[in-house]
Image (cartoon, rainbow, N blue to C red):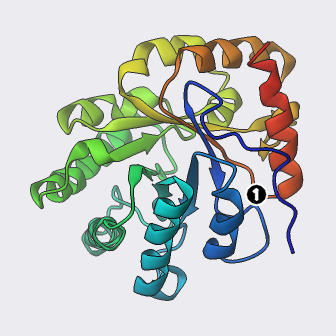
Amino acid sequence: MYPAPPRSYKGVYPFKLGSTSFIYPDHIIPNVKILGRYLDEIELLLFESTPDSLPSKEEITTLATLATELDLTYNIHLPTDISPGDTNPSLRCHAVDTIKRIIDFTSPLPTSTRTLHLSYDEPSNEKTSVKKWQELIYKSMEQLISSGISGKVLSIETLSYPFEWVENIITAFNLSVCMDIGHLILQNTDLETFFGRYSDIISIIHLHGVKNHHDHLPLDKLPEKEIGPVCRILKQFSGVVSLEVFSYKDLTASLQFLKTFRQ
């Protein structure tokens, strides 16, 4: 029997509060059955695109039932092993097909957003390399949106490159933004400036601590100078905040930190 969170956080904040589907070392369903009683939303971690690593049709049915019973919604982290900007056309097609397939088979779930990595894996940051990557990303997104998928259901996550690289793509296809605060801290990005620039299209915030160049730590590991900006951002935000940690210990430490927000 796994320990439950210390109290219910449903409806406590002006934003929906959630965490990941891997807080306990078990499958998605056992995690959701416990966490769904205490949080507003669960981030379903579908990091791998192989069929045997994705939920079955029966599991999706169970997740939909739990959402109704527990007054719960989900956000979906799409696989990180796909590359919509790959130079190999077959790999780009695989990425688009994977995104379409996951959106389709998770359609019975009440879902706030599907978060997508547009990874940049080229060895050079020269303008010509970046422009070619942007063109390939654009083609993949054009193919995806032309299939009937609304851009609004996708949130593009802040990664390790300047987010301005994908700004025009987000605008062109009416996409939303996943503001990963830990990733931005690692880039020394001014959090409040970023939030001010994209606040109208940020649908979800990934929130976790950072220390010694490591992220996805509990929130009590946030750098001291970032605590004020994070709290001010949260007070203005009404979307989804996902505590993107992966253990019960880190979750409870993060929930304790959020008391700072209410002071």
Mark 1 neighbour class, 10 Å CA radius: few under 14, some 14 to 19, many 20 or more: some
Q: Judge whether residue 213 can be spotted in this image.
A: no
* SS label for mark 1: loop
In the image, what residue occupies the spot 49% across and 55% down?
74
Q: Quick check: 204 left or right of 183? A: left
Q: Quadrant of the C terminus?
A: top right
Closer to us: 251 or 143 = 251
Inspect the image, locate mark 1, and give the three-letter code of the amino acid beneath it: Phe
Q: Quick check: 181 left or right of 145? A: right
Q: Quick check: 152 left or right of 221? A: left
In the image, what residue occupies the spot 70% across and 17% down?
231
Point out residue 142 in the picture as x, y percentages from the top left corner: 16, 51
Point out residue 158 in the picture as x, y percentages from the top left corner: 51, 37
Please say if 103 is above or below 124.
Answer: below
In the image, what residue occupies the spot 32% across and 62% down?
87
Point out residue 47 in the picture as x, y percentages from the top left corner: 55, 67
Point out residue 54 in the picture as x, y percentages from the top left corner: 49, 79
Q: Which residue is mark 1?
A: 246
Please say if 182 is above or below 190.
Answer: below
Q: Residue furthest front?
A: 69
